[in-house]
Amino acid sequence: MERGSPLVRALDVGKTYRLHHSNFARLASALTGRRGGREQVALESVTFDLRRGESLGIIGHNGAGKSTLLKILAGVVQPTRGTFETTGRVSSILELGSGFHPDFSGRDNIRLNAAMLGLGEEEVEERRPAIEAFCELGEFLDQPIKVYSTGMVMRLAFAIATQIEPEVLIVDEALSVGDGYFQKKCTDRLLELTDAGTALLFCSHAMYYVTSFCDRALWLDHGQVQALGPAKEVVADYEDSLLRDSPVTQPSAPALETGRAGPARFVEVEVAGGEVQDGRRVFATGGSWSVQLRLESDAPEREMHVGVGINRADGVEVFTLRTTHLEPLRGQTEYRVSFAVTELPLTKGSFSVFAFLLDESGLHVYDRQVLPEAFVVESPGYEFGVVRVEHEFHREV
């Protein structure tokens, strides 16, 4: 794909808010023209560009400036300093419900939002059937938005933003809302758009989505750029920072949305091998280890993948096993599969197992099962580190 000149360009973009201790103080400042209150820097010196078909993930903790940056690029908020430029039609999904009139029906809000995005009356009518079909809201399209659930609002907002085929699409945490079926539909649509040349700005706390969707990632911390580069490298640095700053003391799952209402599910996940001691399954370093999985599918024509992650008791992700590099599962309603490690390299500790049932792209999660403290590894003597690495030693005379 010919990517050409940037569709999004930000140069030294910054945003400062003035905070007042009360509404009265804010009003007095506006009436008198005096600069009361204190300054709060939300964003400082952000520079990047984004070309056709590229995707940029925006990551960072709450309050890092992610949403402020996306609102600036969407034209909702003006920067205090710096410049930005977007080319072509820009569509955004920011705060759910923003841009919708609560007393208007879904159909009326489709026309309203599409018009706000720059579509003429004929274009709105041309694209309206595709929008209505994608959101699958049926008779609720004739009901006012104020009776919609959060998931229904997300369906409508996503359908409008993506069915108008924008040159630039801005998504702020939209995939964290809604059922598994529609999340899968959304991820597929985002991949279609980027493949067709849409430039995507994607903000999420789910690092799995960021590394799967995005070519690059921008890490913000207290409004400042910490890193900008290949998504996998920046995400790895960000996750290392989280571990250093906020050590996890309990096993935790990756920030993924499970799709239990999807077409397939786990029936059983079990660690096999080792010895059972005092109700614990214990393995020796270098011994054989396996995890056995049984799953069911309501749609045997669909292709699926399976993945297993092993986490240490403190939440550190140790290793993963998955089938995404192999032929997908397809053609059956029930499967029995297993992953086997002939020589377990772990040295010591208690470990949890996370099993994931994935779609054909390995991106959307149909189901997830967690086995906390699933097994223990013990070594004859004390060993440093988490894994034992096969190695050679040479001494020069």
Image (cartoon, helix red, strand yellow):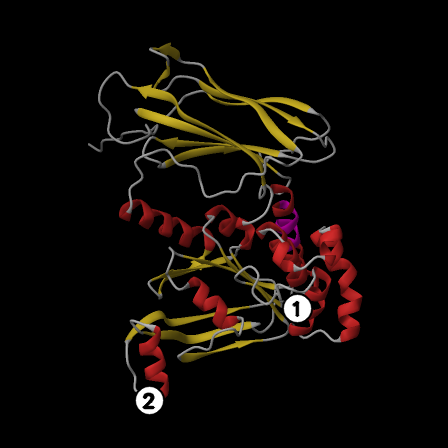
Residue segment shown in magenta? 184-191
Q: CA distance from mark 2 to mark 1?
A: 37 Å
Judge from the rendering whether residue 99 lies leftward or rightward of residue 45; answer left or right: right
Q: Which of 93 and 332 lies nearest the eye of the viewer?
A: 93
Above or below: residue 168 compared with residue 141: below
Q: Position of residue 26 (x, y in %)?
A: 34, 78
Would you call the spot at circle 2 few (<14 residues within 10 Å), some (14-19), or many (20 or more)? few
**Which residue in the structure is indicated by mark 1?**
113
Residue drawn at the location 58% of the way across and 38% of the way down: 259
Give whichever of 56, 63 is nearer the camera: 63
Can residue 265 be found in the magenta stretch?
Answer: no
Task: Give residue 84's position: percent from left, percent from top.
Answer: 49, 77
The residue that mark 2 highlights is: 32
Q: Amino acid at mark 1?
A: Asn
Q: Position of residue 69 (x, y in %)?
A: 45, 68
Instruction: Look at label 2 and name its amino acid.
Output: Thr
